[in-house]
Amino acid sequence: MKSPRHFLPCCLFLALLVHALGMSSATAADRGPTYRRDFTINGVATRLYFKVRDFTVAEASDETVEQWIIDMTDWAEGFWRGYELAGFKSPANRVAPDGVEALEYFLEKGGYAVGNASETGDIRIASPVLGPTHINRSLRAVIAHEMFHSVQFRYAGINARYLDSFREGTATLAAELMDLEVYQHLATNASCVTGYLANPGLGRCGSARGAT
């Protein structure tokens, strides 16, 4: 193992090199600016932010990425409206500087459609190149699933009061009930609803769905 006195100069050299080349380690993989959509639900101003990362121009042109963002934001807005109209709390996880409740998504390159929602942060989704029907359906399911986790986080103490089996099972059930096509897609695979809700002690879904 290299000593710290050798390691630190290397880190400083790399940082200076990145600066000299005009690159930012935090934004080098971003594809364009953050997309923003404002809309109103029951008279309340709400906002979605969306950012695509990692995909190269060879994998997806700028025009293709723009269409991905529009499609995925359409899905996210539809699920947001559906959850609130069903009587659930808003999935917004922060308040923008202008006072609007907001939720932010990131799409990153991955081997299959998976996602992660943070109680205090954004929603991150990994997926291969969009386009094939099964990929798009899986992404819709992941968006709905992860957004319902954001809804769950708005209820105080939910992590302490309920096991993963309940939180994950209800998040998947909500996604299935909100979108018939998502339901049909999940119903032909090993659904987490059965895996979780039928096994209350289960820590994680027993199927290969991947959404958590």
Image (spheres, rainbow, N blue to C red):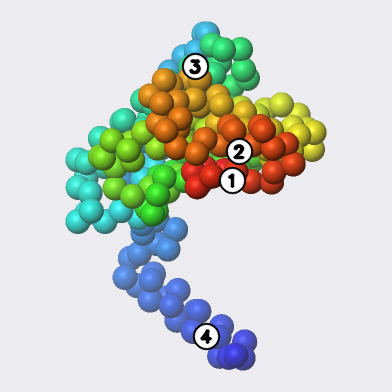
Q: Whole-Å distance between the Cαs marked 3 and 4?
A: 53 Å
Nearer to the camera, 28 or 203:
203
Tell which circle, 1 or 4, labels the residue nearer the N-terminal end. Answer: 4
Label 2 SS: helix
Crowd around label 1: few <14 · some 14–19 · many ≥20 (10 Å): some
Label 2 with label 1: CB-CB less than 8 Å: yes
From what the image shows, is residue 19 above or below residue 43? below
Residue drawn at point x = 55 percent, y = 31 percent: 172
Label 3 SS: helix
Q: Whole-Å distance between the Cαs marked 1 and 3?
A: 28 Å
Q: Nearer the viewer, mark 1 or mark 4?
A: 1
Label 3 with label 2: CB-CB less than 8 Å: no
Q: Quadrant of residue 26?
A: bottom left
Residue drawn at point x = 22 percent, y = 41 percent: 64
Q: Which residue is mark 2?
A: 195
Tell which circle, 1 or 3, labels the residue nearer the N-terminal end. Answer: 3
Label 1 with label 3: CB-CB less than 8 Å: no
Q: Which residue is mark 4?
A: 9
Nearer to the camera, 99 or 185:
185
Q: Whole-Å distance between the Cαs marked 2 and 1?
A: 6 Å
Q: Amino acid at mark 1?
A: Gly
Q: Amino acid at mark 3?
A: Gly
100 left or right of 168?
Answer: left
Q: Amino acid at mark 4?
A: Pro
Crowd around label 4: few <14 · some 14–19 · many ≥20 (10 Å): few
Q: Label for residue 206?
A: 1
Q: Label for residue 112?
A: none
29 left or right of 10?
Answer: left
Q: Nearer the viewer, mark 4 or mark 2?
A: 2
Q: Which residue is mark 3?
A: 82
Label 1 SS: loop
Estimate the x, y position of residue 155 in percent, counting from the top left: 71, 26
